[in-house]
Image: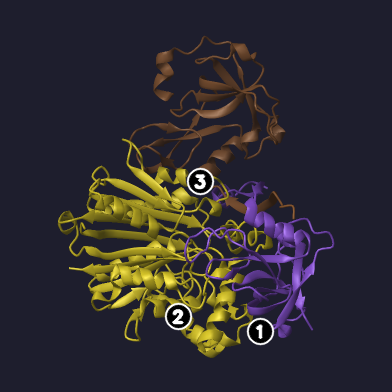
Chain colours: A brown, B purple, C yellow
Amino acid sequence: MELVKSITTPVVLDYEYVTGRAQSRFLRGIAQGRILGQRCVECRRVYVPSRGACARCGVRTEEELQVSDKGTVTTFCIVRVPSENLSFKPPYVCAAVLLDGADIPFMHVLQECALEDVRMGMRVQAVWVPKEQLGPTMSSIRYFKPIAEPDAEYDSFKEHL
Amino acid sequence: MAPTQADHEAPLTALHHLEYAYRRSLGPVLGRFFAGLRERTICGIRTRAGRVLVPPAEYDPDTGEATGEDFVDVGPGGTVTTWTWVSKPRAKQPLQHPFAYALIKLDGADTNFLHAVDALAESRMRTGMRVRPRWRSEPRGEIADIACFEPET
Amino acid sequence: MRDVAIVSFAQSAKARETRNEVEILMPVVHEAVRNSKLSRQEIGFTCSGSSDYLQGQSFAFVGALDAVGAWPPIKESHVEMDGAWALYEAWIKIQTGDVDSALVYSFGKSSPGDLPEILALQLDPYTMTPLWPDAHSLAALQARAYLEATGKSERDLARVVARSLSSAVANPHAVVSGVLDIDKLLAEPYVCSPLRAHDLPPITDGASAMVVVAGDRARQVCARPVWIRGFDHRIEPLGLGLRDLTRSASTEIAAQKAGVHKSKVDFAELHAPYSHQELILRAALGLGEGVAINPSGGALASHPLMVAGLIRIGEAASRIMAGRGDRAVAHATQGPCLQQNLVCVLEGD
């Protein structure tokens, strides 16, 4: 009898995900074209996105502030691996962007930029969807693009790598 | 309508749909079991102590020894050893009208086999009742080749 | 063996939380650490129990560290299990002498997904999961087998429910409670015969945290530390058809290894998510009629998955700390139909 070599076992599960208070405030800010962060009362660091907690200190973050939608590329990688559900065609740049006013970089995508020009310290700005398409979702920011500002000094972001 | 205080405070929700499929290699023991299903037969494996395990297992749960290759055809009929009634089947379950899950002792087996029983009414289910498999029209070598069991009478 | 004691415990439970996991967990961790009188820096080890499948995101458990604060870097570990097993790992680490104290926490929201369906993923992926048997149906298979083998009745199950939910009235963390008439319970329709809705665990979102300390330091920070006198866990095969579902052989062995009956048991907190399982566990642990079971109300009153086992240990410890008993057995379970069982024997000075 010829043995069966393998079986495919599909898993399909649906969840109703609740974002929590801080993230809800952050996403509602995005829907208004604003990027919000929160400052830790103990270490004073500003987290973007707001997450309701300081991962270093293990305390709640409540003080809310708006940060700029301009920032600095602290590090990046060039993605060449294709995958389902990607809205960007590889190769593309995935970058950690430290927004002006924030202490924590967050990940996004760079466009309108030649791959070989991307560098640490590059100044970038968010490109938003048109105002009428803004919603409480990170896809309200389409991507970041380089802007004509001098590169940030390494010392200004070396603590945020 | 202007957003109210409550709108600002209510947390946001979103549907998260998780879907993935693994392709699992079977090895010689389960490979043989599923090959048997493809031929509309059910097999178990006999341990050194003589116990017939269904579905077959690679290792004897009592001793930890490898079970070897002593495959034994069992069933196809068997006896329900316990059951429950599913009155509101979920989409992925074997039947889409009310049915029973049961642990079935197939003829010749020493362990129980989990499957569905299409009894059509809860009142027909009884511990000790005889059932037989209803095969899928085109078996492929997976557990759903047995579409379900049904009462023998 | 080093003597290890529970010096603080905190919990949170709600039928359906709109907070996320970190927001639920943080105040619970803070309360347990504050009440331990140890500083965050003194606590030598942090261990958590949770399951990413409740959130549907791999490595979801890492996000919970926001609630704990991990700077300067901490010694930390995690089990994809009920927090009771995180406590076991912490206890082992203290036994090695590597650390002298630990923070143990667990959390989980059962409400976002279809939990009884999600739990089909813990079954054999080749022959069982593809049939997608929900956890309640599997428990019902065990319940019927148990009733038919022992001659116990559905009325015996209803008695467990009535007693549990009545005890739960005094528990501020219960999500179900009340004084219920047994005949009215029996008049309710089956959900999956022979089980009715009240025989099943309520969907609950929650968290718990506990601090344990070795040796005399425990007495310095706690007026009545609760010593772990015995601790063992055992597991049975995964295949339901391979097991005798009418008794809990793994609990019997764990009870013997943990020394449950070395001395008198005043009360027990048993993690029985389904009513019939309390009867199986009671027999496996050899607890006679004189031993009060689940004064907290147990898992039928509140069942945050991945947390409920640690809560049994915490509830038992809290009771001993408050002087309402000297020696207790706490139990936790994982897997379908009591597949894996942990027994913890607790004693106050």
Decide if residue C209 is on the left or right side of residue C139: left
Residue C171's spot in the image, x, y percent?
39, 71
Q: For the residue marked with disc 1, what is the amino acid?
A: Gly
Mark 2: secondary structure: helix
The residue tagged with tag 1: helix, strand or loop?
loop
| Looking at the image, residue C290 lies above or below residue A80 | below
- Whether label 1 touches label 2, CB < 8 Å: no
**Residue type of the residue flagged with mark 2:** Leu
In the rendered structure, the residue with mark 1 lies on which chain? B
Residue bearing the label numbered 1: B128
Q: Can residue A14 be seen in this view?
A: no
Residue displayed at 24% across by 79% down: C264
Sequence-first tag of 3 and 2: 3
Q: In this view, does C289 lie to the left or right of B64?
A: left
Q: Are marks 3 and 1 on the same chain?
A: no
What crowding class fits label 3: few (fewer than 14 Cα within 10 Å), some (14-19), or many (20 or more)? some
Residue shown at 34%/64% (left/top)? Answer: C232
Quadrant for residue C1, please give it.
Answer: bottom left
Question: Eyeballing the image, is C41 above or below C298?
Answer: above
Which residue is more in the foreground, A59 or C98?
C98
Dots 3 and 2 on the same chain:
yes
Q: How crowded is mark 2: few (under 14 residues within 10 Å), some or many (20 or more)?
A: some
- Label for residue C60? 3
The residue mark sitting in front, 3 or 1, is 1
The image position of residue C307, as x and y in percent, is: 43, 60
Residue drawn 76% across the image and 62% down it: B145
Q: How crowded is mark 1: few (under 14 residues within 10 Å), some or many (20 or more)?
A: few
Relative side of C338 to C115, left or right = left
Can you identify the residue that label 2 sits on? C279
Residue at 29% x, 50% y: name it: C93
Compute the Cα span from label 3 to label 1: 45 Å
